């Protein structure tokens, strides 16, 4: 494991005793990263990359290493042969780094192994960040999860006059671990209808010719960015009013799973099938033919042309990445603590209930009603940096005082029967608690000036998406962020419901 650049023939001892990792989704993630770099350099756009496909860590780790961010955060992983050797040894090894995009990955706000939350995190991150574009890569396997299916509705809460933009990129490689994906078997016509119903205009990029796909993706990304900027310019003109959701662009990237890897192994098709999902050549330590095939595959990238004698990326390639904080791995939007500013808060005791000690235990009060009054003051004093996310329960949970200050948000035509609903509203009510929690994490835990609050009946648990908020604070490369606050404003306990909540 000391021969990362193939300066000598590959040997059995160069291979880890147990190979772990996921190759299938990595080629497409690499392609997207390269073209987002180009977009940043060409336009100066602030970009955050959210990688939804599970176990896409190899691509994001490799790109943040090549752009230099990884070595700045982890100096022992230097930009030379010794550092690259350290990186390879750490990958998917006990005590090392995981095979999915995770907290230690520079530029990440999303736990890639926790499928379903990429798009909802992306929308949360752009609320009240008008200059930010989040490129959210959605795996077509991930797209089968409930949270992801609900996340497409984010455009109906995205106000282009004040929020940034999300560009979904559906990585349609047609296979999961062992089965075809549902979306992978739909016709282009059905997919166009599906996403048109969600409010998107699909830009298609598909094929297996590397150069042709690169050209097509470059054109699609340019078109998508231009349309996004047109939408925002129109919404931000003086006197303009947003009355309904625009049609946003998205990209469907259909390329083979495990693209550019081994086409066949032992006479069995691998590239473009489920067999490319993880390690396409698993027997390299014991099978000389597999070892030779692996070496031929690795040498096809011509590492001698990509790295100099010291193992550093050659200058003409290093210059393709953006500079400094514009790099995708170095963006401050993925390091919420850098951008956090304290909320302006009044003395909470002004909303406390006066209780006569002589009558303690005999008075009846709703404890959440004064909480709603306090949150209304928070909205008044922080008109652009605070939101409450609620599963349609602000009124029923007695937090209705918030609606004296701001409407419920819905970027859609308003019906006279509605009650305090408008595209300009800042009370985020949607029935899905997945969306409430995911929006909160993207808005507050990773990239916003002030905290948000989720009004819900479900507390966080170690396996919940909220665990990402806690894990973020353990990464030494990140500044402390504000806490993800969850107010459990209902009670529920029954033999058939394992959730126990308290007011």
Image: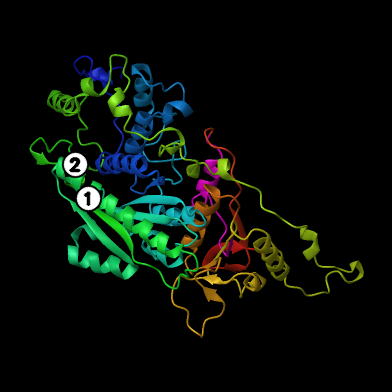
Report x, y in % for residue 478.
53, 37
Which residue is farthest bottom?
Answer: 417
Report x, y in % for residue 103.
47, 39
Q: Indicate whether 288 appears above or below 422.
A: above
The picture quadrant where one finds residue 361 is bottom right
Tell me which numbered mark, 2 or 1, is placed earlier along the sequence.
Answer: 1
**What residue range appears in magenta?**
454-475
Report x, y in % for residue 183.
24, 60
For the residue pair 353 and 16, the one nearer the viewer reads as: 353
Name the secondary structure under disc 1.
Answer: loop
Residue that label 1 marks = 173
Residue that label 2 marks = 259
Q: Is residue 25 left or right of residue 74?
A: left
- Count of numbered tags: 2
Which residue is farthest front?
Answer: 238
Residue 55 visible in the current orientation? no
Q: Are marks 2 and 1 in contact (CB under 8 Å)?
A: yes
For the residue pair 441 and 249, the one nearer the viewer reads as: 249
Residue 17 covered by magenta stretch: no
- Residue at image position (43%, 31%) is 69
Q: Is residue 159 left or right of residue 83?
A: right
């Amino acid at each position: 494991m000391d021969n990362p650049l193939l300066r000598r023939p590959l040997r059995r001892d160069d291979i880890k005793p147990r190979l772990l990792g996921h190759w299938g989704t990595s080629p497409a993630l690499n392609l997207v990263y390269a073209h987002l770099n180009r977009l940043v350099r060409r336009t100066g756009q602030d970009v955050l990359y959210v990688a939804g496909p599970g176990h896409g860590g190899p691509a994001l780790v490799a790109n943040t290493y090549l752009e230099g961010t990884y070595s700045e955060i982890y100096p022992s992983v230097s930009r030379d042969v010794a550092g690259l050797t350290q990186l390879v040894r750490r990958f998917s090894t006990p005590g090392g780094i995981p095979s999915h995009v995770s907290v230690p990955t520079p530029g990440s706000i999303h736990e890639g192994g926790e499928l379903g939350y990429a798009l909802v995190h992306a929308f949360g991150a752009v609320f009240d960040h008008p200059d930010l574009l989040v490129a959210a890569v959605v795996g077509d396997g991930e797209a089968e999860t409930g949270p992801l299916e609900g996340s497409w509705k984010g455009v109906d809460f995205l106000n282009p006059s004040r929020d940034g933009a999300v560009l979904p990129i559906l990585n349609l490689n047609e296979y999961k671990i062992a089965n075809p994906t549902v979306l992978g078997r739909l016709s282009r016509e059905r997919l166009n209808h599906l996403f048109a119903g969600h409010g998107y205009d699909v830009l298609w990029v598909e094929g297996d010719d590397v150069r042709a796909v690169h050209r097509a993706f470059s054109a699609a990304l340019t078109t998508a960015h231009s349309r996004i900027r047109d939408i925002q310019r129109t919404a931000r003109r003086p006197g303009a009013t947003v009355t309904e959701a625009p049609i946003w662009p998205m990209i469907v990237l259909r390329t083979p799973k495990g693209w550019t890897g081994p086409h066949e192994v032992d006479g069995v098709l691998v590239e473009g099938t489920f067999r490319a999902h993880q390690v396409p050549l698993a027997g390299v330590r014991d099978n000389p033919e597999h070892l030779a095939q692996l070496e031929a595959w690795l040498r096809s990238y011509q590492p001698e042309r990509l790295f100099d004698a010291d193992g550093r990326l050659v200058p003409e390639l290093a210059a393709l990445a953006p500079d400094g904080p514009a790099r995708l791995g170095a963006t401050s939007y993925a390091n919420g603590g850098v951008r956090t500013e304290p909320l302006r808060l009044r003395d909470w005791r002004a909303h406390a209930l006066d209780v006569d000690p002589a009558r303690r235990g005999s008075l009846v009060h709703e404890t959440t009603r004064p909480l709603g009054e306090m949150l209304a003051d928070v909205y008044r004093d922080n008109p652009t940096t605070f939101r409450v996310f609620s599963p349609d329960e602000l009124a029923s949970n007695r937090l209705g005082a918030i609606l004296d200050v701001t409407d419920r948000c819905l970027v859609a035509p308003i019906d006279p029967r509605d009650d305090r609903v408008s595209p300009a509203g800042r009370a985020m009510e949607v029935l899905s608690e997945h969306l409430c929690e995911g929006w909160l994490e993207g808005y507050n835990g990773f990239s916003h000036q002030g905290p948000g609050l989720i009004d819900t009946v479900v507390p966080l648990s170690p396996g919940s998406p909220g665990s990402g908020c806690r894990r973020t604070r353990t990464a030494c490369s990140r500044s402390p962020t504000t806490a993800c606050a969850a107010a459990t404003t209902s009670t529920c306990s029954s033999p058939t419901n394992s959730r126990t909540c308290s007011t």
